[in-house]
Amino acid sequence: MSTPYRIVPAGDSALIVEFEERIDPGVNARTIACADAIQAAAIGGVRDVVPTYRSVAVYFDPLHTDGEALTACLEREAARPPSAASAARPAVRIPVCYGGDLGPDLAAVAAFAGVSESEVVRLHAAEHYRVFMLGFVPGFAYLGIVDRRIAMPRHATPRVRVPSGSVGIAGVQTGIYSAETPGGWQLIGRTPVKPFDPGREPPFLLKAGDAVQFYSIDRAEYDRWR
Amino acid sequence: MEVAQPGVSVIKPGMLTTIQDTGRWGFQARGVPVAGPMDPVSHRVANALVGNARDAALLEVTLLGPELEFEDERLVAVAGADFDLSLDGRPAALHAPFTVAAGSRLRFGARRLGARAYLAVSGGIAVTPTLGSRSTHLISAMGGLGGRALLAGDRLPLGDPSLRHGVALAPQEAITALPEGRATIRVLAGPQTDRFTADALEMLQSAPYTVGRDSDRMGFRLEGLPLTYARGAEIISDATPLGVLQVPSSGQPILLMADRQTTGGYPKIATVIAADIAIAGQLAPSDAIVFRVCTAADALKALIVQERALMALEGPRP
């Protein structure tokens, strides 16, 4: 069965391949495979290929791109039937010190779920999450899908400053703040691992399509990591 | 760095002066914004005037300009917004290369038109690149000098002027006509025009929008006729191209510019054509924008006209 898609322009310097409009691991896998294939085609003039939940943005220089070749490539890759599920990549394991002053919203999430704080930690760390996309700030990965019981909505009023490394929940999404920014997610812990460090090789911890699993560390271990 | 590189000292930083090359492309899939110049045409003109490569890093000056002192002899040029410019107290011309001697001071004075000027120095500004680019992105504190706008007392290292790609040029006419309080900007429909009511594109064109006070390098908050969704207020977050008009539930569009985030969750009604990004980049708060929907053919024609003018100015290049 072919995957429904459409290709729409965004101005004169970008084309967007849109797949089904839902947040779904299968649709997202299809999206990322399409982006990888477009990138691999290395069409002259293409400046950036950006997969998101269910669409791929292809940025190009209109004066240095063969528009017909680009459109043909997008049509071909978008219509290509999804390949059999490739071998699951091993999950990237990320340590988190849950609760306390590093996770100021853990108690609120526990109250929301009607369970203990340790049960929230267990549920959050039990899941294998998918990196659906990166965005917001460099290295920020949108992970899902969070267990419905602990899928607490974000704060009505965002915090002015969320420390880098904070691990938060926003509905069925979870993620790590990769920079100190304003933010409204429910903060349940903090990781000593940097999702983005421009001085490190490689600079990024995660890419779209990766699997992620969190594991609990205590405060002493967190301090040793740092 | 151990090697003593000649540089420029910042005496006064100006309101918002940042180091910009042509942007940090290739990492949007990792959430890294592109940044780069707000007016890419004037950026390219300034580099051409001193014989730099097109992607050399230079200074983007915003509304209130800096005062700088040079440590060695350089060729410099300023393009874009119309400022009074003085070199050691004597007037200097815009859109023309001139030599500064070691110890010379270049000062930006009163601004008449436009919002952003581009100061290129032969050899370019040689700060260490981050992810392949020297462009400053303020929100993520990346690139440029410590990822921030210039401060008094900063020192900017300069590159080797003998590596310049071309030759200095004669004085030039500006390619981008500076807006006098109002600019007409052409857009193409899409990528999500179908999210809006059938008359939304007409609404967008029917009266000018004002650039709001809290507008910056990320985007311009526009004030004017509200645009109405035909269905849901939020989309599944997707990519946010340069020049796209995203519309939050207030109905007041936001024009996304150089420092935009890579993704966003608001429907996008239309996108500014590449040829008109430069004039948008010369707008300041309280200026007005008249939007005009054009065709893809119009957009390409406008870009070719602009490119021909730029290439004629740059002359033959290696």
Image (cartoon, rainbow, N blue to C red):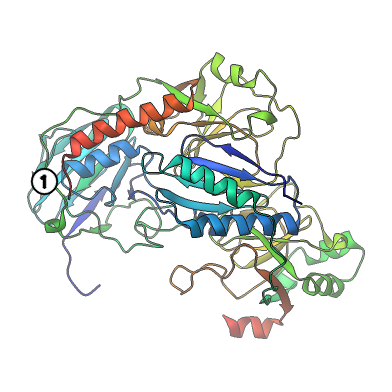
* Nearer the observer, A16 or B177: A16
Left or right, residue B288 beside residue B314: right
Asked if A187 appears above or below B22 in the picture, the reply is: below
For label 1, the residue is B167
Q: Quadrant of residue A137?
A: bottom right
Q: Is residue B204 left or right of residue B199?
A: left
Residue beneath the point at 43% across and 28% down: B299
Q: Position of residue B237 (x, y in %)?
A: 66, 47
* Above or below, A153 relative to A86: above
Hey, what amino acid is under mark 1? Val
Q: Residue A92, percent across and down? A: 65, 75
Q: Is residue A167 left or right of residue B299?
A: right
Pick the residue in front: A119 or B85: A119
Q: Nearer the viewer, residue B293 or B285?
A: B293
- Label 1 Cα crowd, 10 Å radius (few <14 / some 14-19 / many 20+): some
**Which element carries disc 1, helix, strand or loop?**
loop
Q: Picture coordinates of residue A196 (x, y %)?
A: 53, 67
